[in-house]
Image (tube, coloured by chain):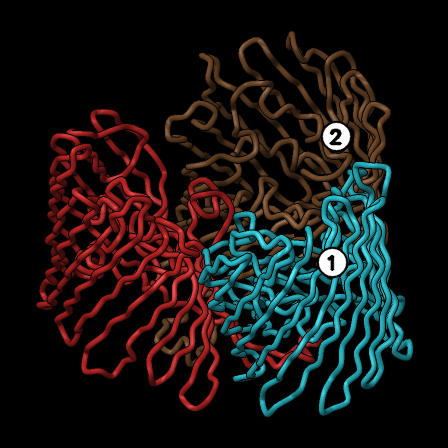
Chain colours: A cyan, B red, C brown
Amino acid sequence: MKKSILAAAALTAFAAAASAQSSVTVFGIVDQSINRIDNGGNTVTQVKSNQLASNRLGFRGTEDLGGGLKAGFWLEAGMDNENGGGAASGGLAFNRRSTVSLLGAFGEIRIGHDYTPQFWAPVVGDVNGANGLGAGLNLVDKNLGSSANTFVRANNQVEYFLPGGLGGLYGNFGISAGQNEAGNKHWSGRLGYGAGPVDVSVDYGQTKTDTSDDFKVFGVAGSYNFGVAALYGFYNQNKWGSAKQNSYGLSVGVPIGAGQFRAAYGHQTTSDSIRDGSSRLYSLEYVYSLSKMTSVYASYGRISNTDLSNFKVQGNGYDATGDVSSGYNAGIKVSF
Amino acid sequence: MKKSILAAAALTAFAAAASAQSSVTVFGIVDQSINRIDNGGNTVTQVKSNQLASNRLGFRGTEDLGGGLKAGFWLEAGMDNENGGGAASGGLAFNRRSTVSLLGAFGEIRIGHDYTPQFWAPVVGDVNGANGLGAGLNLVDKNLGSSANTFVRANNQVEYFLPGGLGGLYGNFGISAGQNEAGNKHWSGRLGYGAGPVDVSVDYGQTKTDTSDDFKVFGVAGSYNFGVAALYGFYNQNKWGSAKQNSYGLSVGVPIGAGQFRAAYGHQTTSDSIRDGSSRLYSLEYVYSLSKMTSVYASYGRISNTDLSNFKVQGNGYDATGDVSSGYNAGIKVSF
Amino acid sequence: MKKSILAAAALTAFAAAASAQSSVTVFGIVDQSINRIDNGGNTVTQVKSNQLASNRLGFRGTEDLGGGLKAGFWLEAGMDNENGGGAASGGLAFNRRSTVSLLGAFGEIRIGHDYTPQFWAPVVGDVNGANGLGAGLNLVDKNLGSSANTFVRANNQVEYFLPGGLGGLYGNFGISAGQNEAGNKHWSGRLGYGAGPVDVSVDYGQTKTDTSDDFKVFGVAGSYNFGVAALYGFYNQNKWGSAKQNSYGLSVGVPIGAGQFRAAYGHQTTSDSIRDGSSRLYSLEYVYSLSKMTSVYASYGRISNTDLSNFKVQGNGYDATGDVSSGYNAGIKVSF
């Protein structure tokens, strides 16, 4: 979904003095769905972004420096298109990714605001990826109440990615000095193997918090594509002092014509005095591709929480503590 | 003014894996004028955006899905360029339009943040459109003090547009669940007929407010192009409980060489205990086109308010309640 | 560094009705460095933008109107890429430049948010320009505690630029009604001569403040390129009532292969009851160009303050009043 067109380099009067060998790709996704969400018995109809893939607008490019060396940049902003919003917090900001890279036979060095390596297990180990009512990620507590702000992305990050051509081995490591701030100072790593139908990976990370305890993440994910169906699974453990959450998910994707049928099951258990509880997730989704760039979809998801657990298929302004969150939706996603 | 260039699709090393059949158009308007505005006897010289057309930066595209079906997206942000601003509220946001569409022989289904169908009468029924010192829209009270926030645009909107080829008939209908919020929950519709020199349309809409009364809009607009001159007229009525505003405008556009001379008259009456009053608008403008994309213009506008009415040709930080607001300006508009 | 590619105009189904003679250039810089900054004895490791050149994303274009006349627009936003930020203040905004222009044999008229003419002496008279640990600009007090907000840029500005072809003479004059606000109401001018290896310029400006005293800027800058080395120097004086700051800088750039070695010395003296003091700056930098668009660099800078002076090579959250601010960094800058 990140594939897109290039703005072609061209010389005009205005650019007469320009070297004009570079290029910038403008890319994005606009995904809007109509959702009907019931949290704790309170139902709201809503138009929402991000239900099949995360809405985004981006600018990126690479320059060939010769000798196998390349430089690249990547600026990617989230969008709440249903509200005309830029990023969730107001104006457009490159809050999804904002990096500069140097790439070569050695791999890639990447600097800026980016995903953390620790993030990926619940995403690559789920047919739903990171989005929608049925994503296993909906069950993951991203900080357990700590000040950690890095489960998904980190500021001020310096990352190293292994090069391709290692026989299926891949991995990256990131460290964020975080200007030394609690909640932002972080490191994590990820290692995986993908070849043919199989893909497995593990990740681990630590983030400094405003207590003496680091927020720690461990994840493992795998998938196997049998052709008639692809199976996915993940396990993720987050810890902060005495608080701990274990979550896992199992899901399947079955190609049907130009579409894909998806079913997922997930479970989480949290051990923590103020958020003790468990949750169970079921979901079904059908995605139909009108083209490589455009899809329509419909889905159903349901999370049943016990005790103090309060996970939701989608927020709707109401609480679901120890209760059920469920919903269905239908939407369209256009990529460019 | 929304016509613009396309970023051409091109294959490069970076896009080798991309399907590259899509395209994105970057478009926009930068309009800056020097205004001299007198509100209630207080005069301020200012540089302002939006005086001939609304400043904007946008990204849009369509994809042909085959079988007469198309998918499209439209992201359009307002800009206060005199302040280096993005949208008025701070950073760049797609606050003008932020939608995804499915188009076909059936018409168009459009989802997201967009104009409401009820908005258009004072705009299409005025030679000045929505902009400038002389726009009839300057006389329209957009909420009568209610919490309605939808006169111009609505969040979370699902719209249906009639297809072309209906012998001049056009129309659209929009509904916004508005996440069930007062001020945002809305529906409205518009129906029109345009063929050759004639264009007529009506619109109606309702918005839920934080009282038991809906905010209601009714508008009708028409124009006729005689060649030597085009005549425009509109009538708009906004109601909320016992508060009511009637406004109308009459205007003319006369082509003179590469330019257009515009004259407008408008009037409003408000019946409401805390905003009772009436207002009268006169305006003159000359727009000279340096090219299809670039125009220069100069205009004069004057609104005289009675009682509690406080309408202005342009804000300048001062009040004009029961007083006169007048001003003149000269500016340049560049489209791309 | 502002040279970049053009989005080529192309006709597609979507643009069939478009005139398509215009063009828009998407351009930018992403610069990220790893800094180690010690202010007053407190050291912080940080990832930062803007250390060789200011990060930016922009959209610009010109249209040939015939008869030697052109129209242009320029929208340029700053970015704090290390935080995924748009502009420093939150979302993306065209806070670096946001203008529309009319250009011809007479020169250029430019309207909007732009640099002030008074800004340039410490920038063009320094091998480091406006960026990095060693920039002489780090020593310039931009308002001496006044409400003036125009040292670098001004809102609501109307500028006139001399045309080219005046035998090396160049200059511009800007006036900002500033909607009559203290801190924003401003005028300034700049005149220079550049031909072959020599470039000299002077600037002067005044800004209305919230006291009866204007904030006044006077600057002079010069450079001479001997080939084996280029020498730069500037002098800048800012005044506000009884407060006064004199600053100057001397610097040299020596080409070495595909790189440039830079050394700079600067000094400032402030006479003002609440900020009395002086400061001395030393810096060294090496910039290596991997291509015309991509550079890597490393630098060292040190400012020693006396009395109440508190100038820094780079902020790190700590104070350096009457103390030393020093640091080193290494980074990469990609232009597009």
Could you classify mark 1 by the number of other residues whose Cα lies within 10 Å: few (under 14), some (14-19), or many (20 or more)?
many
Image quarter (top left, top right, bottom left or bottom right) of the C terminus of chain C: bottom right
Q: Above or below — where is B9 with respect to B78?
A: below
**Residue A277: which quarter of the image?**
bottom right
**Residue B190: which quarter of the image?**
bottom left
What residue is shown at x 25% (from left), y 65% (from top)? B189
Taking depth in this image into account, of A76 and B113 the one nearest to the observer is: B113
User: Does residue A187 show up?
Assistant: no
The residue pinned by badge 2 equals C317
Give the image location of residue A68, x and y in percent. Answer: 84, 71
User: The disc labelled 2 sits on which kind of residue?
Assistant: Gly
Give the image location of residue A160, x and y in percent. Answer: 85, 60
User: The disc labelled 1 sits on which kind of residue?
Assistant: Tyr
What residue is shown at x 34% (from left), y 75% (from top)? C17
The mark found on residue C117 in the picture is none
Q: CA distance from mark 2 to mark 1?
A: 25 Å
The residue pinned by badge 1 equals A115
What residue is shown at x 59% (from left), y 44% (from top)? C87
